[in-house]
Image (cartoon, rainbow, N blue to C red):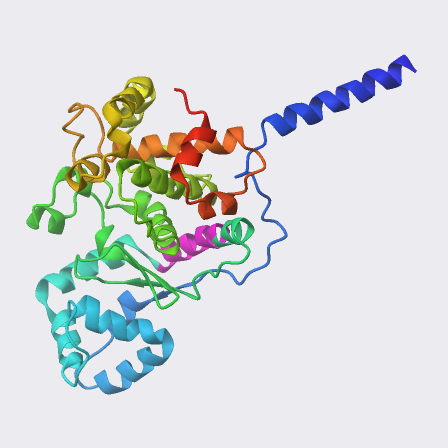
Amino acid sequence: MNYLLKIFTAILFVNFFTQCHHNQLDVDTSKVEIEPVVFKRLDIDVFSIKLENSPQKMMEFQKKYTSFYTRYVSSIVNNGGKTDSLYSQTLLRFIENKDIKTAYNDLKRTYTDNDIELIGDEMTEVVKRFKLFFPNRKTPKQFVTFMSGFQYNVVYVDSTLGIGLDMYLGSNNMFYDMMQLPKFRTRTMNKEHLLSDAVRGWVITEFDNADPVNNLLNHMIFYGKIFYVCDGLLPQIQDSIKMGYTSEQMKYCETYENKLWGFFAKDNKLYDNDLKLVSEFTSDGPFTRAISKDCPPRIAMWLGKQIIRSYMKNNSKITVEDLMNEKDVQKILSKSKYKP
């Protein structure tokens, strides 16, 4: 009898311990059945167009890529111009441009069909996890890689998730130097950051921040949610990549988390709706000037993610979907019991 009691007590202890450490992001995708994600290579297809075959090819691509092809030609290649009888000439000028041709050759060397296939495999797992977290939401119907003319990293439109591969040619690509892009930007313009950027771009579009309250806390919580969801969709990718930080910047955040939170918590900064102040703590850059040259940019987003982590840890019955549906940021902050 005593032996059975010990076993029962041990089982209760294990169950209690498991419940206390329940992680809402820990899901099993083995039973989720979806069509594997296959990226269509619009970047390669458009460069097969010649003057003599352009009418045929453009009709073919319109059918293959549906409305995204029209968007691509009118809004990306033509930079927001009208879709008229001359748009085919615009596309031809684009693919015949000397610099664009050179960049395209860089793109082909950097991203082989095998590389894109591997990205598709990773995205398949992302979509499976998304379906478990958000069973009632739709996922992209089409996945496309394209040549943006160095304008767009990620677009999600007309049920299509598109990635501008020319924005991920490698941090030292000569075109980035020619455009005089700052180092804090080019540091993440590579293969390593492509998937996390694409997923974050999709998630931001999926959960639009339409709250009329435009204070700093609202932005912290919104982006904290976004990065938390990205953690759930990309558990295999390290935090520094998903945040776009260096290892040194991550170490700074972890070392000074308490002081960083104190900086925002005092003087009602959290409730300030000055757009300039909000931008200062949520915009990209080499560092956060108002705090320190060692403090990474978008520091309010990083702190927001820590608040959300604390909220989910201290409210184990809240699902990821519940989190994204909760619009009361003050409630989230209070129930997070966040105390670094």
User: The C terminus appears in which quarter of the rendering?
Assistant: top left
Task: Name the outermost residue toward the top.
Answer: 2
Along the horizontal axis of the image, is 328 left or right of 284?
right
Along the horizontal axis of the image, is 58 left or right of 321?
left
At 35% from the left and 53% from the top, the residue drawn is 208
Q: Can residue 47 be seen in this view?
A: no
Q: Main secondary structure of the magenta part?
A: helix
Along the horizontal axis of the image, is 22 left or right of 266?
right
Quarter assignment of residue 305 = top left
As displayed, is residue 216 above or below residue 77?
above
Quarter assignment of residue 269 = top left
Closer-to-camera residue (196/130): 130
Please provide the residue range marked out in magenta: 113-126
The x and y percentages for residue 133 are 53, 48
User: The N terminus appears in which quarter of the rendering?
Assistant: top right
At 25% from the left and 74% from the top, the residue drawn is 48
At 46% from the left and 60% from the top, the residue drawn is 139
Q: Can residue 296 be seen in this view?
A: yes
Closer-to-camera residue (262/47): 262
Closer-to-camera residue (136/64): 136
At 17% from the left and 75% from the top, the residue drawn is 91
Along the horizontal axis of the image, is 165 left or right of 131?
left
As displayed, is residue 172 above or below residue 159?
above
Query: Count the marks: how many?
Result: 0
The x and y percentages for residue 192 are 32, 43
Q: Is residue 121 magenta-colored?
A: yes
Quarter assignment of residue 17 = top right
Closer-to-camera residue (221/183): 221
Task: Name the outermost residue toward the right.
Answer: 1
